[in-house]
């Protein structure tokens, strides 16, 4: 079994979670991405969010939310995504950048347009009262 190691940015406002859709994809994903060799969680989150959303994560504000695993969308069976999630404050204005085509605020009703691992994260956030 192969595991894809990703770091995700959990940003919730008014009971909705920040999600993104990449060019050429049909599902929305919580922003973030794959760790590069030797990177810490903090370094990965800062780099990925800067690349995707044009904002700067404030490192001291990072708070661990949880780690979630599920079958990777669009990959053969047995390829698992491990998503380590953090909340954090940021500076700047959110703007789609790089491979990101769209930024959208989703709620729990949007399970049909997100990835399998994101469904687990949405359910966790809903149970904690963070997500509408």
Image (spheres, rainbow, N blue to C red):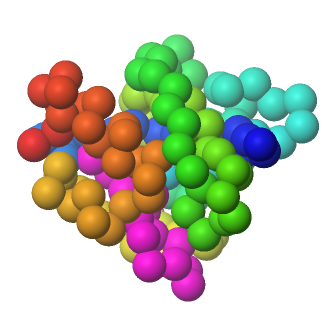
The answer to which quarter of the image holds residue 6 is top right
Residue for point 89% across, 29% down: 38
Residue for point 17% across, 50% down: 108
Report if residue 7 is visible in the image.
no
Q: Closest to the observer: 67 or 21?
A: 67
State left or right for residue 24 relative to residue 29. right
Residue for point 32% across, 68% down: 113
State left or right for residue 60 relative to residue 132. right
The percent position of residue 25, horizontal first and vertical second, equals: 52, 78
Q: Closest to the observer: 88 or 117?
A: 117
Above or below, 67 relative to 35: above
- In this view, the residue farthest toward the bottom is 24
The percent position of residue 106, horizontal first and vertical second, equals: 23, 57
Q: Is residue 73 magenta?
A: no
Quadrant of image for the C terminus: top left
The percent position of residue 111, horizontal first and vertical second, equals: 26, 58
Q: Closest to the observer: 5 or 116?
A: 116
Residue for point 56% across, 63% down: 73
Report if residue 9 is visible in the image.
yes
State left or right for residue 18 relative to residue 98. left
The percent position of residue 67, horizontal first and vertical second, equals: 52, 26
Q: Residues in magenta?
A: 17-30
Quadrant of image for the N terminus: top right
- In this view, the residue farthest toward the right is 37
């Amino acid at each position: 079994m192969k595991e894809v190691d990703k770091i995700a940015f959990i940003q919730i406002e008014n009971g909705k979670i920040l999600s993104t859709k990449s060019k050429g994809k049909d599902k929305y994903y919580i922003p973030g991405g794959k760790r590069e060799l030797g990177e810490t969680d903090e370094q990965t989150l800062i780099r990925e969010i800067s690349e995707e959303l044009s904002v700067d994560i404030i490192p001291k504000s990072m708070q661990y939310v949880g780690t979630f695993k599920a079958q990777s969308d669009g990959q053969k069976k047995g390829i698992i995504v491990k998503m380590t999630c953090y909340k954090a404050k940021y500076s700047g204005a959110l703007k789609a950048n790089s491979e990101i085509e769209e930024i959208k605020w989703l709620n729990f009703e949007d399970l049909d347009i997100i990835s399998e691992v994101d469904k687990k994260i949405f359910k966790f956030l809903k149970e904690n009262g963070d997500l509408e």
